[in-house]
Amino acid sequence: MKKGILWIVLGLAFCPTAWARSPYLAQMQHWGEAMSRLQTAMFINDFKGMAEASWAINRAPEVDKDSLARLEKALDSKEYRDLRRFERYLRETSENMAKKAGEKDIRGVLVEQGKVVAACVQCHDLFQVKILMTLK
């Protein structure tokens, strides 16, 4: 039974229709798509593409107020602050990454990209299921 529930949750996490139901979840999908573009640009040493993808991550639309209000009710105050902190960190780090790409500093891009990926993974580990359940 627990395995069945786990598969349902995982299916929702990776199902585009589940993401599309909420502007917040659509924003997560936007970030994922920008990360894919970044990775492709990195493979071919396309600094312009790296910068564009980094700015796309940075300039994703702000989270809609309705989703934020629902999340604030569903999470305790520390969790909510941490979730918002992850978003700010992602935007700051992606801005640094775009600047490194503009300087054609591949090592700098890699360092910042590692920070972005680590923040995404940590945030997903902490909040993904709660966000999906709250905003479904």
Image (spheres, grey):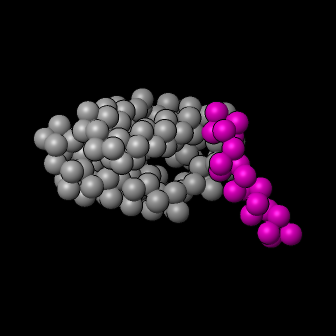
Q: Where in the figure is residue 117, as x and y percent of width and height?
A: 39, 56
Residue most toward the left?
103
Q: Is residue 7 above or below residue 101?
A: below
Q: Is residue 116 above or below residue 27?
A: below
Residue 70, visible in the rendered structure: yes
Q: Where in the figure is residue 30, as x and y percent of width and height?
A: 49, 35
**Side of 130 where 97 appears, left or right:** left
The residue range painted magenta reads 1-20
The residue positioned 55% from the left and 45% from the top of the image is 71
Q: Dividing the picture into quarters, in which one does residue 75 lie?
A: bottom right
Q: Dividing the picture into quarters, in which one does residue 114 lie?
A: bottom left
Q: Dividing the picture into quarters, in which one does residue 120 lie?
A: bottom left
The residue positioned 80% from the left and 70% from the top of the image is 2
Q: Main SS of the magenta segment?
A: helix
Q: Where in the figure is residue 61, as x and y percent of width and height?
A: 42, 29
**Side of 116 where 47 appears, left or right:** left
**Quadrant occupied by the C terminus:** top right
The residue positioned 83% from the left and 64% from the top of the image is 4
**Quadrant occupied by the N terminus:** bottom right
Residue sitting nearer the eye, 64 or 33: 33
Residue most toward the right?
1
**Side of 94 where 62 appears, left or right:** right
Residue 89, visible in the rendered structure: no
The residue positioned 65% from the left and 48% from the top of the image is 14
Residue sitting nearer the eye, 92 or 117: 117
Q: Is residue 15 magenta?
A: yes
Residue most toward the bottom?
2
Q: Where in the figure is residue 84, as x and y percent of width and height?
A: 40, 48
Q: Is residue 136 magenta?
A: no
Residue sitting nearer the eye, 131 or 101: 101
Count of picture labels? 0
